[in-house]
Image: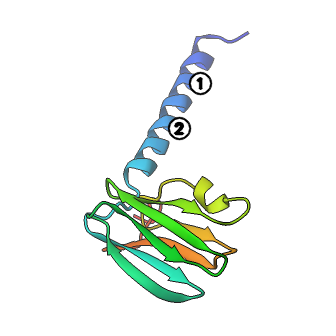
Amino acid sequence: MLNRRDIILIITLIVLATGSIAVTFLTLDRPEQGTVVVRIAGETVAELPLEEDGTFEFEGLYGPFTIEIRDRQVRLLEESTPYRYAVLQGWLDNTSSSIVSLPNEAVVEIRGEQQLDGVTR
């Protein structure tokens, strides 16, 4: 059976864990000004401003794909690959991740002022 000190210890550990997770997510690198970089087969084919919303179509090695930039985030909206795994990756909003479509040999990433993640700050 738990006594009063055990309950206080458990509550303290939960609060500390929740606080550290919140600090990590709040300090992820979300650049104020950024560029969406699209590479196909290792070659940069487009550099788009993160501040301007829109949809853009590209021709990958497997077929066409479309990216969408909205609210300082980017995602692969449509692609012609069989399983559409890159579409399932969702929105990208920081410089520490990228969206990869292997059949198209395409990489979509955000480049900004800093390339640090929440842990190295």
Q: Residue at x 37, y 54 (%)?
A: 27
Identify the disc placed on residue 19: none
Q: Quadrant of the N terminus?
A: top right
Reading the chain from its start, which is encountered first: label 1 or label 2?
Answer: 1
Q: Nearer the viewer, residue 11 or 90?
A: 90
User: What is the residue that sits farthest to the bottom in this orientation?
Assistant: 43
Task: Find residue 61 and report its horizontal and vertical position in percent.
Answer: 64, 81
Image quarter hosting the C terminus: bottom left
Drawn side of residue 31 relative to residue 87, left or right: left
Secondary structure, mark 1, is: helix
Query: Would you identify the image quadrant in which residue 9 lies?
Result: top right
Q: Secondary structure at mark 2?
A: helix
Q: Which residue is mark 2?
A: 17
Q: Position of residue 110 (x, y in %)?
A: 41, 70
Image position of 50 with respect to 22: above or below: below
Q: Which mark is residue 10?
A: 1
Q: CA distance from mark 1 to mark 2?
A: 11 Å
Bin the neighbour count of mark 2 within 10 Å (Cα to Cα): few under 14, some 14-19, many 20 and up. few
> Which residue appears at 68% of the width and 12% of the height?
2
Q: Nearer the viewer, mark 1 or mark 2?
A: 2
Percent across and percent down for residue 34 are 31, 70
31 up-or-down from 20: above or below: below
Answer with left or right where residue 20 lies relative to residue 89. left
Callout 1 environment at 10 Å: few (<14), some (14 to 19), or many (20+)? few
Is residue 119 toward the left or the right of residue 70 in the image?
A: right
Query: At 57% across and 72% down in the image, what residue appears?
Result: 64
Which residue type does callout 2 highlight? Ala
Q: Position of residue 51 (x, y in %)?
A: 26, 64
